[in-house]
Amino acid sequence: MRRSLSLAAMVLATASATALAPCARASDAAAAFAPPSGPMRLTRMVIRPLGDGEAIVATRSYRVAFVAMPGGGGWRIDGVLVETTIDAPPRLAALAGIERKRRDDAMFPMRLATDGTIKEAADLGPRDRAAIDAAVEAARRQLKTPAPGDLAFLAQIRAAAAGSATARWPEALFLPGPLSQRTERTFALPGGGEGTVLIAFTRSGCCGTMQRAERKVTTRMGGMDQDAIERWTLEPEGG
């Protein structure tokens, strides 16, 4: 029988999964990176299935521009959040409200190496983690018998407050050309035992950079699978 996981374990799994994000390297790309010159619309959709046919879907769009660094020192991506949509079941309305207010554009400016791989993102800086922890705990109390998927969403909100260490994007996200890669790693669980993180990353693109990409992170522990799916698209602004 599948058993529910503690919130602490889900937080650990979330942090472990996102910390493993750079699973695709520059050597995976056959085509040369050549970013567009005009303004672009970068959209990231995060899907967190709740295991009962429902899901939390967070979609954020950013207006971005690729800027060449002086002296051939790589690239900089400037960006600003322009649109946020959060879809969630009514029972998670309070938590969806917290997620909806989170700007989540402090990763810009983002630094790219000369080959287009993500080199560094701006420090997300301090967060009001105490306030977020209090809101998460209040929501947990409101969910008298929370489903494992609900706990996972609470864990994702709490992990988001931890900063950039738990929100790393794939290193080879913006490279052109097709890519399909799968990695698997284990991590220790609180109280003993091990969990497994499976990461599947795919990318397609042409004309010098990525057009579409997807990362699926499956966390396996305690007899339960928990998925998180991220999808990115990059297209001309207004197109």
Image (cartoon, rainbow, N blue to C red):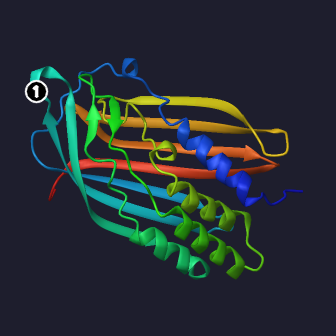
- The residue drawn where x is 67% and y is 52% is 226
- Is residue 200 found left or right of 68 in the rendered image? right
Q: Which residue is mark 1?
A: 70
- The residue drawn where x is 73% and y is 69% is 147
Give the quarter of the figure containing the N terminus.
Answer: bottom right
- Is residue 144 found left or right of 90 in the rendered image? right
Name the foreground residue: 166 vs 41: 166
In the picture, residue 5 is in which quadrant? bottom right
Considering the numbered disc 1 on the image, is that residue within a helix, a strand or a loop?
helix
- The residue drawn where x is 14% and y is 37% is 67
Is residue 3 visible in the rendered image? The answer is: yes
Name the foreground residue: 150 vs 76: 76
* 104 up-or-down from 70: above or below: below
Q: Report the amino acid beneath label 1.
A: Pro
* 66 up-or-down from 69: above or below: below
Task: Locate residue 105, reporting x and y percent.
Answer: 32, 55
Task: Locate residue 36, reporting x and y percent.
Answer: 14, 38
- The residue drawn where x is 30% and y is 59% is 61
